[in-house]
Amino acid sequence: MLLIGLTGSLATGKSTVSNILRSPPHNLPIIDADVLARQVVEPGTSGYNRIVAYFGPTTPDLLLPYPDDNPQQNEDESSGPPDDAHTKEAKRRKDTARRRGRPINRAALGRRIFGTSPTRLRDRTYLNSLIHPRVRLLMLRHLLHHYLTGAWAVILDIPLLYDTGLDIFTPVVFMIAASPPTQMSRLRKRDPHLSAREAEERVGSQGSVGEKVERTVRRGEGRGWVVWNEGGVGELEKRVGEVMGEVGGRRGRRMEGWGGWVWLVLWPVAVGWGVWEVWRGWRGRRAWERRKEEEEGKKSD
């Protein structure tokens, strides 16, 4: 099973590419890190409790109202007979939601972590230390499922693929890129409530597009693919199709559709191949890090 890392930066079009890859003719399973990150901080989880404990005292608007705090809805529910099945179910859901806690206000949390000041960097580091280990565990569960069902490839949709070091586990990386002006234009259009400064801080929080592009190119032929997204969806679909044709041809789809029992029989081969690919990824990452260290050393001389 081939792991393909899908990464990019804010408003480069990574989500659009993810939707293209999960749709015909590709039909690839997607493991979306952003979706998993929301799941691990849902009310009632340990991640949620730690976020509230850390950010709550200094962020008055951290939590949203309960979803059922709707006067009209409450009036409609209370108007039914006490033993009505609908009324009982609504009350049960309401009680469960209140036990778990109020939803997190992601916009308020974003204002606490996006930016370059020492305080915001510290808060973002703390939040990542909570979320990333939990997300990785869920990823492993999903990967095991796709492995046993015989998927020939799985897309790991991870915005911070390089930052988290997960690139060593993905033999192939798709980097979705766009110029900074295009990023800003898309982000302000998508989230009009953001000021220009807030938009710049959010774009900057996910790292430089140029550096990610360079890292992807340096992975080597067939291992790193840069998809520039400056045009429309049709143009993007065409480019993604071309890249997938190359990847499928290079890596092969001969085992697509084979049952999970085949992978169980071949697990020693799969493990050996996986270890080899991880070693190659680690070696490439170390080469990049050494190169950056040398560049920083030259600057300081």
Image (spheres, grey):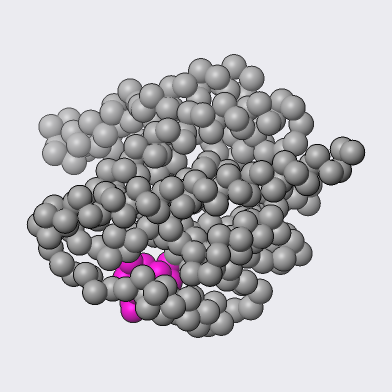
The stretch drawn in magenta includes residue 176: no
- The prevailing secondary structure element of the residues shown in magenta is loop
Q: Is residue 254 above or below residue 193?
A: below
Q: Is residue 298 visible?
A: yes
For residue 29, side relative to residue 181 (left or right):
left
Residue segment shown in magenta: 19-28
Residue at 49% in and 61% down:
173
Residue 100 percent location from the top left of the image: 35, 26
Q: Quadrant of the N terminus?
A: bottom left
Viewer-closest of 255 and 82: 255
For residue 13, side relative to residue 255 (left or right):
right
Q: Quadrant of the C terminus?
A: top right
Residue 109 percent location from the top left of the image: 59, 34
Viewer-closest of 191 and 155: 155
Residue at 57% in and 26% down:
126
Viewer-closest of 236 and 35: 236
Q: Is residue 161 above or below residue 16?
A: above
Viewer-closest of 135 and 197: 135
Q: Is residue 156 visible?
A: no
Residue at 44% in and 41% down:
37
Q: Is residue 217 above or below residue 131?
A: below
Q: Is residue 46 above or below residue 144?
A: above
Residue at 66% in and 74% down:
230
